Image: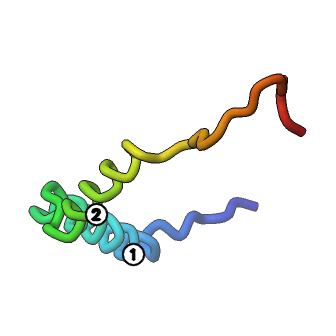
Amino acid sequence: MRTRFAFPKLLPALLLSLSLLGACSSSPHAAQPSERQAKAMAMWQERCKTAGEKIYKTVENVEGSI
């Protein structure tokens, strides 16, 4: 017994999905970050410059800590 693929029923849904996907990816605003995103990226990059572990005090005759 052979089963038929329901391609005619799926075709409109497939075409609609592809057209919506294409419309979202070709948005002119997607290529340029907004002013808010640019400000956030600048803040993030500035904070990365000062991030990390800091040593405030060193002690002599100590090989390490637990």
Name the quadrant containing residue 8: bottom left
Q: Is residue 4 left or right of residue 14?
A: right
The secondary element bearing badge 1 is classed as helix
Which residue in the rendered view is the most extreme toward the left? 28
| Residue at the spot of label 2 | 40
The quarter holding residue 13 reads: bottom left
57 versus 7 height, above or below: above
Vertical placement of residue 38 versus 66, above or below: below
* Front residue of this view, candidates 1 and 56: 56
Mark pair 1, 2: CA separation: 38 Å
Residue situated in front as seen by the camera: 39 or 19: 39
Give the secondary structure at mark 2. Answer: helix
In the rendered structure, the answer to whether residue 61 lies left or right of residue 17 reads right
Q: Residues within 10 Å of mark 2 (few under 14, many from 20)?
A: few
Q: Is residue 14 left or right of residue 29?
A: right
Front one among 5 and 21: 21
Q: Residue at x 47, y 47 (%)?
A: 51
Residue depth check, mark 1 versus mark 2: number of the one nearer the observer: 2
Answer with mark 1 or mark 2, whichever residue precedes in sequence. 1
Tell me where residue 54 appears, x and y as whole percent: 57, 42
Residue, far front: 60
Residue sitting nearer the eye, 30 or 34:
34
Residue for point 21% across, 63% down: 39
Relative image position of residue 20 (x, y in whole percent): 27, 71
Question: How many residues crowd around disc 1 within 10 Å: few (fewer than 14), some, or many (20 or more)?
Answer: few
Position of residue 35 measured from the top left corner of the image (x, y, whole percent): 14, 68
For the N terminus, which image quadrant?
Answer: bottom right
Q: Amino acid at mark 1?
A: Ala
- Which three-letter amino acid code belongs to the residue tagged 2? Ala
Image quadrant holding the C terminus, namely top right
Residue 14: horizontal and vertical position, in percent?
A: 38, 68
Question: Which residue is identified by label 1?
Answer: 13
